[in-house]
Every structure is written in C-alpha cells, then in structure tokens.
Amino acid sequence: MNQLLRFTTAGSVDDGKSTLIGRLLYDSKSIFEDQLEAVQASSTKKGFDYVDLSMLTDGLKSEREQGITIDVAYRYFNTPKRKFIIADTPGHIQYTRNMVTGASTANLAIILIDARKGLMEQTYRHSYIASLLKIPHLIVCINKMDLVDYDQKVFDEIAMAYKAFSSKLEVHDIQFVPISALHGDNVVNRSEKMPWYGGATLLHILENVHIESDHNHIDARFPVQYVIRPQTKENPDFRGYAGRVGGGIFRPGDEVVILPSGFSSKIKEIRLGDEMLKEAFAPMSVTMTLEDELDISRGDLIAKPGNQPVASQDLEMMVCWMSQKPLNVNSKYTVKHTTKEVKGIFKSIQYKLDISSLQRVPDADQLQMNEIGKVNLRVSQPLFPDSYRRNRITGSVILIEEGTNETVGAGMIV
Amino acid sequence: MSSYYLSHLKELEAEAIYVIREVVAQFENPALLFSGGKDSIVLAYLSRKAFYPARIPFPLVHIDTGHNFPETLAYRDGLMKELGVRLIVGSVQESIDKSKVMEETGINASRNSLQIVTLLDTIEQNKFDAAMGGARRDEEKARAKERFFSHRDEFGQWDPKNQRPELWNLFNGKKNIGEHFRVFPISNWTEMDVWQYIQMENIPIPKLYYAHDREVIERNGTLLSTSPYLQLKPDDKPMVKRVRFRTCGDMPITGAVESEADTIDKVILEVAASRQTERGTRADDKRSETAMEDRKRAGYF
C-alpha cells in the first residue's frame, strides 16, 4: 500500500535547495520532457550554459524574473513505495510566514547545510520552525560535499555541532546525510565518493521513515463539520455528522460525549458514501450516526467520556504573525479552531522570540510580521483544545482580521 | 491488530471530501464547475460520497464553449441524471452573440480564453460565492502556487502575490460583498492519482479517454481531431489513427496521442510510462511561458 509523505524544504537560492529538489525529481524520473524542454529554453534565453533546475520550482512571473522563491510551491513525485508532496518554501527571514505555512502540514523537514559554511543563522531558524510546528522527522542534509573533497571530518563536525544545538529542540527523530545535490551523491543513488558513510541515501530515508504514528491515535476527537439531513422519502430521519477525525479511533458501539452540551450517546454507524466502516481514525473523512437524536451542529466536538479535552476560554499559545499590521495587545480577531469560529482578544504578549539567536525578548508590546511570540488570547466562547504538542489538528488556530478578512496569524496552543 | 494509516489515495480522498464539505459549510451558494473532463468527473463523484445519502447540495455548472466533443455532452447529461443534480450551462456562444466577447479568427483560433467572460458572468448571474474546480497543482507551474481556497476580487481576478496563507486544514473563506472564491479540492492529486482513483472506484468516464479510431491532422507536433470547429490549412492531411485523449478541453485545441490503451489498466500503464505532461498536448498553454498565470490572473481557472 502506497503511503503519502508530506515534507518541507526551506532555503535560499545559493544553498542548493532548488538543485536538490530538481535532483530528486530528475533522478526519480518525475520530470517530463516538455517541462525539461521549457526549462532548458529559458536557461538558454537567460544566457546560462547549464540547465537551471530551480526554474522547475519557481512558477510565478515575478519569481522567475527575480530568481527567488516568494511563495510556497507544491511539488509532487512518487516512487514505487510512496507518494511525496514537497512544500517548497523560501528561506529568508522575511518569508518566515511562508515557511510556517509549508511546515504546518509536513511530516518531515529537510534542513540544508552548506558543508563549506557549517551551521548558520538560517539553520537555527529553519530548525526552530520545524520544531515549533512539531514536524515529527528531520533530515539534515549536509550539501556540497563535493566542494570539501567528500571529507568525513567536515561531515562529522557539522553533525556534532548540530546535535549539540538540537538538544534544545523538540524533535526526536533527526538523521544526517552527506550529499552533493549537484552531482547526485547520496540523494537517490549511493555515493561512491563517500564510502565512509554507512547510512541510507536521502530518498531511502524518505521512503522508509516511520510515519504511521505521526497522527494522534489516542485521544478520540471528531469535530463536526456539517450535518447531513437528506429529508427524502427513503431517508426521512437520517441525521449524519460529517467530519474528519482529528485524533483517536472511533468504532460503532463506542460511547461518546458531545461537547460543549455534555450529552452522551453511542455511535450507531460510521460510513463514507454507501460503504459501512468498522472504525475511523485520523485523517479519515467519514459520516457518523448516533443512537440518540441530539441537537448537534457544526463546531461541536464528539469525544469519549473517559478522555475529554478541558473547556477553556483563556488560551496560551505561540503565534507566528503574518500581517503587515502588527499584533497589538487588546486587538480583536476572529479565531478558527477545528470547525469552530469564535472571537478573540489578545490579553498579553509574554515574550517574543529573536528568531536568529532563539533568545526570548521580554516586555514586547507588539509582534511584527514574521515574528513569533508567546501570547495570551481570551476567546468569546469556550473551546475544547488539546495542546499542539499532543495534537496538531486540535491544537492549532488561525486568526482572521475583521474587515479585510485576511489570515493574519497562526497559533499553536501550549 | 489493525494498522492505522491510509493509502495515499484514501488520504487524498479524505482531504478532498473535507474540502468539499468545508465549502458547503462556509459558503451560502457554492457550485461545482464541471468541464466533462476526468478531474471534474472525479470531483462530482467525491461530492456524492461527501454528502451521501443526501444529494449533492450544489449545482454543477458547465461553461459550454460550443466546441465540445459530442461525447462530453452526452456523458454530462447521463451523469446529471445519475447524480440527480441540477445543471447550469453558461454559453460562450451567447456571450459572442451578445457581443460581450470577440471570437478569435485564424488557423489557431480558440474559444479557450473567451470562457473567462462567460464564466465570470455565470458566477455573477447566479450569485455563486464559491466555485469548485478540478484544477491540480501538478498540472502547471502557476497552479503549483494555488491555494485550496483561492480568493478572487470583485472583478474575479487572482492576485498571486497577495494570497492568504493556508495553514493546517483551517480554511478561511471569509469575503466581502462581490468577491468570491475558487476552491480546488483535488489540488494535491497528480494525473496518476486521478487515474488510479478512477480505477479503484470504478468511475465511468467518456470513451474519449480510451483508444479509438479517429480522423486527425498533425499540427505543430500535436494530433488534432477534425471537426467543424477546426479550420484546415491547404496542406493539412486528415488521416485515421488509433488515438486517445489525456485531457478533454475544446475540440480544436485538445491534442490526441496515439495509443492502444483501451482499458483503464492499460491507460494507467501508459500514463506511468509517459514522458510528456498531459498539458503538453494543450495548445492553449503553449502560447507563452506564463500563458496559464496570465489567464488565471484574469479569472480563468
């Protein structure tokens, strides 16, 4: 059975990110002739004497003109083992919000380090974002090994320095691979130049990393998305709760509790289309029916009596700010949490993070665009969240500005 | 002991159904844009699954260029009956007759970009606030940057540099009066995923997608079906070949490929071995390097 792995890369033009992606696509035979021809033609037009693989990923006119990635671009490739979705994001500090966006749905992040330069400010930043967004797996690619004579000592020193730094991060699965994206060493094919490296190639890790437990299968959470009521002759009384499982496992016959009402019932059936299911787990979309007729609507949560999230109106969260207009204490926003929408007001900013040094800056009264900080948010009605650490689906919120309707912030509940 | 993970097709299905349901929950008057192509067919079947046993709670909208394959129209009408869903047709011919748009002339004339006006008119007349479509990010480089929920201003335009960030599965469909959204539930699917899903779910598709004998001409390396809508040059030599189509756009611009694949299994093998993207057969994308981005900015899909 083919699985889906979503991974993110962050980087700027010169660290070889686009070359690496181009290499993965090319060596896994995912680039088509007409795409390659188009890239070859524009490389020639620009006067390059090589094929600029980065043009495969930079899609918008302005990006191609400036030679930079501005937005998140999604790329797809597959091998006989897995299908991959790459969220390719820019790496500069002014694009932190794009990195956060790309990281929000990723199972895995690739951190690129230039072997000649070692750990840089950008390395710390990308790693911190991966850790903040709780990406379960990290692969640190030490790139441009060809420019340091494929020297094991260089690789070992960088890996050691990274391990020392990453002990402060909350990522538990980190692997190191020495590569040359330009020449293809250890990307898809094993390098003959680095016999000292006994580990797997990058693609091999991508194909085999254990992602089965990336979703929470412990705390049963089913945010009701939509109520299906056909009201037809064949189905006069059918009342199905449509939604996507946010965590845990649900089976017909399970006792459930509805929040916020607190009513309890039993699951009658779980189905999708005309197929009856024996169980449902994240991230399945299903329709549930219950034994009792209850008043349940969008925004309600179906959980289990022995494992309920605690109602809360005061939320502590890490926020990444995404708007030109700064976040101010006492400003009001619309808050989206799972399928529920409430109003919220920022009560305080505990600190903001200097994202280059990872030091906390206390006494901040604003968060500017691309800044990350810890804040307190008071919401108009109780939410039933989990901590983001425990569940990325039920622990995340977005903030929407009234008037412009822009998405201005991403919040991870502590 | 069961294992708690999904195949990639099941995960993509779950994601698409979640997005479709989110549209119905967040918007007052959504619609599904139905082209008759395989992507919008899959979208229609996903919509049925999403709301079953209720009927699909939105109409299907077909922008009829007047240059469709007859097979597409026959398939469309059959599907509407099967799904029990309302069909709304926006006619490009009508837009031409009302002098809202000018028909292109010449050998490579196409009604492809004329659709934009008819599409925006149809959205406005029916007051649709969300139009779902089967566009995929793997199709084309401008589409790779598209959101699931894509905001359009009051002129129906796309501003690629000012898109809302889209985090986790929290979709922001808020808008001001006169604005609308385009929504792409199968954004993350590839051509291969669509074919594998059609196979897994046994979804019937128009016969155009399977190998058949057809009269074609060769132009700029592409095989085009002869039809009343295709102006022939004196040196065009119509010939009968065994072909199939990888996409189903308008007759004059949709290229055929020579093929013996007359079953879904054979089609999948052929797609797997293919060295050209499916849009490589589309004359509308070949006009310039940013042809798709330009049309999208103007309100195209």
Image: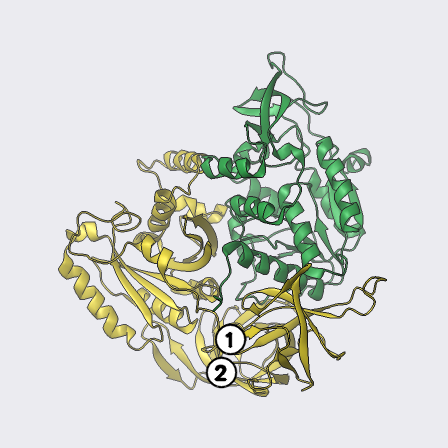
Chain colours: A yellow, B green
Chain containing mark 1 = A
Which residue, as the protein is rendered here, is positioned at the far top?
B234
Please give left or right for residue B182 compared with residue A72 in the image: right
Please say whether residue A348 is visible from this viewpoint: yes
- Give the answer, above or below, for where B146 lies relative to A252: above
Camera-side residue of A174 and B117: A174
Residue type at mark 1 is: Gly
Please give left or right for residue A322 compared with residue A255 in the image: left
Task: Please name the residue that numbered disc 1 is placed on.
Answer: A411
- Callout 2–callout 1 Cβ contact below 8 Å: yes
Tell me the quarter of the picture where residue B37 sits. Answer: top right
- Give the answer, above or below, for where B100 lies relative to A85: above
Residue type at mark 2 is: Val
Task: Please name the residue that numbered disc 2 is placed on.
Answer: A375
Label 1 crowding class (10 Å Cα cut-off): few <14, some 14-19, many 20+? many
Which residue, as the protein is rendered here, is positioned at the far right?
A233
